Amino acid sequence: MKVLITDGMSKEGIEILANAGLEITNQKFTPEELLQVIPNYDAILVRSATKVTKEVIDAGVNLKAIARGGVGLDNIDVAYAKEKGIPVLNTPGASSISVAEMALAHLFSLSRFVYRSTYEMQQGKWPKKEYSEGFELTGKTIGVLGLGNIGREFAKRAIGLCMNVIAHDPFVTSTDLNVKLVSKDELLANSDIISLHMPKIKGEPPAIGAPEFSKMKNGVVIINAARGGVVSEKDLLDALNSGKVRFAGLDVFENEPPTEAQKDLLNHPNVSLSPHIGGSTPEAQTRVGIEIAEKIVETLKK
């Protein structure tokens, strides 16, 4: 059986596929090229870049598995794949630690102006006075929106920093963590910092937009290492400009790479940025490769 890997995979994962006797093609294709080659494969493994659309699924007449090396499945037409009886596989827990740590990296950087002072010192400046008014994380109330694998890892680390952690997840009714579960409105009203760890639901409005910003404390900090579109970028920019949001840390964006239309948000002085690399650590990629490879082998051998 043949497996197409379009967005790369760890060597450990490739070894598992090869040892199972699967024939592997590890190559990037344009959307047009993908439609031409996909009929030759029994499984396709993607990450964020390749989109497995209805057209790709229809063209993949021999597909027995569609796999995503990561958590989100927004680049795969999951409903149509299921309608066609094709299993969709992913790795919901493999990159959780790396993404949680990325969210914290933004929070630390923002709280003490590290992202700004690094650049200015490289320009020969000494902005000691300007950046002496950061804030401690200890004792702050942090709201975690989404208490799945990544949200849990983030919450554990926030607890370790002696923060007061509250959380909202419509699918979680109890937890063994030292976290208070609250309604979404209660979280919005009481959090000094809000970190998002939830999927973007296709066809639904952003989880955080103008109505939600209006319920938050003035000077709240927003961290989004979840998915682009979970936070309305237009409304976030308005909230930053008004002072409702003091800082924002963003690893994900509505368009990736961002377009000219997103320039004002990306250039805002109170925004810390990274190019959707939350799960891109060697440790996470090894875990992702091993887990998704094992799932592909198991599915194809049935």
Image (cartoon, rainbow, N blue to C red):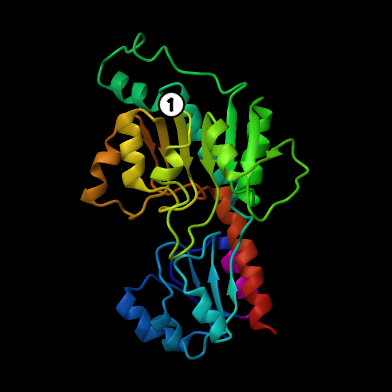
Look at the image and give the residue range highlighted in magenta.
13-21
Residue 269 position by quadrant: top left
Q: Is residue 3 visible?
A: no
- At a point 46% along the width and 43% down the height, the residue shown is 212
Is 208 above or below relative to 299?
A: above
- Does 286 lie within the magenta span? no
Indicate the position of residue 222 as horizontal and vertical percent values: 46, 36
Classified by dominant secondary structure, the portion drawn in magenta counts as helix
Toward the right, the furthest residue is 176
Residue 202 position by quadrant: bottom left
Q: Is residue 63 left or right of residue 6?
A: right
Q: Is residue 200 left or right of residue 168?
A: left
SS state under label 1: loop
Residue 112 position by quadrant: top left
Indicate the position of residue 139 as horizontal and vertical percent values: 62, 21
Indicate the position of residue 1 as horizontal and vertical percent values: 57, 86
- At a point 76% along the width and 48% down the height, the residue shown is 174
Toward the top, the furthest residue is 129
Q: Quadrant of the C terminus?
A: bottom right
Callout 1 amino acid: Gly
Is 264 above or below relative to 107?
A: below
- At a point 52% along the width and 50% down the height, the residue shown is 279
- At a point 32% along the width and 13% down the height, the residue shown is 127
Q: Is residue 219 visible?
A: yes
Is 27 above or below relative to 126?
A: below
Indicate the position of residue 122 as horizontal and vertical percent values: 29, 22
The residue singled out by tag 1 in the image is 219
Q: Residues within 10 Å of mark 1 (few under 14, many from 20)?
A: some
- Quick one: 259 or 302, which is closer to the camera? 259
- Quick one: 229 or 43, which is closer to the camera? 229
Is 270 above or below relative to 260?
A: above
